[in-house]
Image: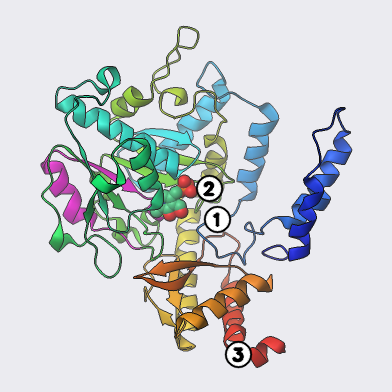
């Protein structure tokens, strides 16, 4: 199938615009619509030629585990909802901490995404910092509370901005830490941290894959009494690979987010909120009710969701399928492929903006904006591969993300060949 659906397949989706049936339709007919109308208009992001965003694929073991979750339809609030899911998620959480070498006593909440995880962690941070100021946030709310600052990198991910809006920090009130040209926090220009600061750092900046200087920032921020949160949606997995040095000092933070549905090759949706002192996440997310008290450590007391899918189970299966060596091999292979693509693009005279790529992301642009647009249009329209646009330092660029477990050298080379064709209209015609 084409990597991005053909216009005819997209147009055929209009067949789905039918009125709600008065009388139920046969299951076989519903399945046929999914198969014949919807499936041809899907994006082949589970395949090896998809280089958009940081999507990741689906390992067979994770897919099977996801089917298990659906088949058993467990309401995985905790032990009372599903002893099996609770046990599997407990093991998965411990394995995540082990793989990422984070504090082993930390709480691991399996939620929908890094967005949800970031929101959860920042909420926990607010509870903790206000409690240290003698303020009970759960009981008294924000009205009259000591004012906290949210301190973020200039390049902060949009989902942290979303959390800032939801939590009432206000995006105009953010303290933005200046970054180096590589898009990571400049350790020479840090603000003076206080015990009223929630400081966000990034493991894997979304364009460049860059890492903030944890060893320089985290001890300084925590010594001042700040809470440090690390957004590691995809990049934190570098800690389980030969690129571990990029994450040096990251374990000193108070909380972390990392996705399973991106680099760990788990189907959507599964992301984690990890909090060093479980108490703060539990205080923020506690969902005890007279009819559903649960046990400490139950996922319903750690996640945004109350009724919830057993999202940790496919993550458990992926970790078991890959093992420590498999995670490292995959991450290392993807980083090497990003380097290979970057070299290929540079050899064509394109500007690689994060050369050499620190991780699995290649950020590049054409010799002028028109060439960048032509490359994007050709690749996206080809059906052979796909990557997406971005803006970098005020000018259009494109991002190539290597994050699918099936991607190998041949796919990387085919992608570069596609760019060659985009640059050379005669090759394109051929
Ligand atoms: C650095 C970073 N943080 C957060 C997110 C949001 O992750 P999710 O899509 O799982 O909510 C992303 C997604 O690309 C990201 O790259």
Give the total of numbered labels.
3
Residue furthest toward the top?
Answer: 290
For marks 1 and 2, give the CA distance: 7 Å
229 relative to 153, above or below: above
Residue contact between numbered discs 1 and 3, judged by CB atoms under 8 Å: no
For marks 3 and 2, give the CA distance: 36 Å
Q: Is mark 1 within 8 Å of ligand 1?
A: no
Q: Nearer the viewer, mark 1 or mark 3?
A: 3
Q: Nearer the viewer, mark 3 or mark 2?
A: 3
Q: Is residue 364 left or right of residue 183?
A: right
Q: Which residue occupies 34% across, 36% down?
A: 121
Residue contact between numbered discs 1 and 2, judged by CB atoms under 8 Å: yes
Query: Which one is nearer the viewer's eye here, 105 or 302?
Result: 302
Residue 154 can be seen, yes or no: yes
Query: Pointer 2: what residue?
Result: 261
Crowding near the residue tagged with mark 1, few <14, some 14–19, many ≥20 C-alpha atoms within 10 Å: many
Query: Pointer 3: what residue?
Result: 424
Query: Pointer 1: what residue?
Result: 56
The verdict on residue 212 being magenta is yes
* Residue 219, percent from left and from top: 15, 48
- Decide which of tag 3 and tag 2 comes sooner along the chain: 2
Secondary structure under badge 1? loop
The verdict on residue 386 being magenta is no
Secondary structure under badge 3? loop
* Residue 17, percent from left and from top: 78, 45
Region rendered in magenta:
210-236
* Residue 1, percent from left and from top: 75, 63
Snapshot colouring: rainbow
């Amino acid at each position: 199938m084409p990597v991005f659906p053909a216009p005819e397949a997209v147009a055929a989706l209009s067949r789905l615009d039918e009125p709600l049936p008065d009388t139920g339709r046969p299951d076989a007919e519903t399945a046929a619509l999914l198969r014949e109308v919807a499936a041809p208009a899907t994006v082949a992001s589970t395949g090896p030629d998809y280089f958009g965003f940081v999507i990741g694929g689906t390992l067979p073991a994770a897919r099977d585990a996801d089917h298990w979750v659906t088949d058993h339809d467990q309401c995985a609030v905790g032990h009372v909802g599903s002893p099996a899911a609770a046990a599997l998620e407990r093991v998965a959480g411990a394995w995540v901490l082990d793989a990422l070498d984070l504090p082993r006593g930390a709480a691991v909440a399996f939620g929908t995404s890094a967005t949800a995880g970031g929101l959860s962690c920042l909420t926990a941070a607010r509870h903790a910092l206000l409690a240290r100021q003698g303020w009970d946030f759960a009981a008294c709310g924000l009205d009259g509370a000591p004012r906290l600052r949210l301190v973020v990198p200039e390049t902060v991910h949009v989902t942290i901005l979303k959390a800032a809006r939801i939590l009432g920090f206000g995006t105009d009130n953010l303290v933005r830490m200046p970054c180096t040209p590589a898009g990571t926090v400049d350790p020479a220009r840090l603000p003076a941290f206080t015990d009223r600061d929630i400081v966000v750092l990034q493991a894997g900046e979304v364009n460049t894959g860059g890492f903030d200087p944890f060893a320089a920032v985290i001890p300084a921020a925590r010594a001042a009494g700040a809470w440090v949160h690390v957004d590691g949606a995809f990049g934190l997995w570098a800690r389980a690979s030969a690129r571990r040095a990029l994450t040096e000092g990251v374990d000193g933070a108070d909380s972390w987010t990392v996705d399973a549905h991106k680099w760990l090759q788990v189907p959507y949706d599964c992301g984690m909120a990890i909090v060093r002192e479980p108490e703060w996440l539990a205080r923020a997310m506690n969902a005890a009710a007279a009819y559903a008290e649960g046990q400490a450590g139950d996922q319903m007391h750690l996640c945004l969701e109350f009724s919830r899918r057993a999202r940790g189970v496919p993550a458990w299966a992926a970790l078991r399928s890959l093992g420590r060596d498999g995670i490292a091999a995959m991450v290392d292979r993807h980083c090497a492929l990003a380097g290979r693509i970057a070299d290929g693009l540079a050899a064509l005279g394109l500007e690689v903006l994060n050369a050499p790529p620190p991780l699995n992301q290649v950020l590049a642009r054409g010799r002028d904006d028109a060439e960048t647009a032509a490359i994007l249009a050709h690749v996206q329209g080809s059906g052979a591969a796909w990557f997406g646009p971005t803006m970098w330092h005020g000018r259009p660029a494109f991002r190539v993300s290597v994050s699918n477990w099936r991607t190998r050298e041949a796919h990387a080379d085919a992608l570069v060949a596609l760019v060659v064709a985009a640059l050379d209209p005669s090759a394109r015609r051929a």
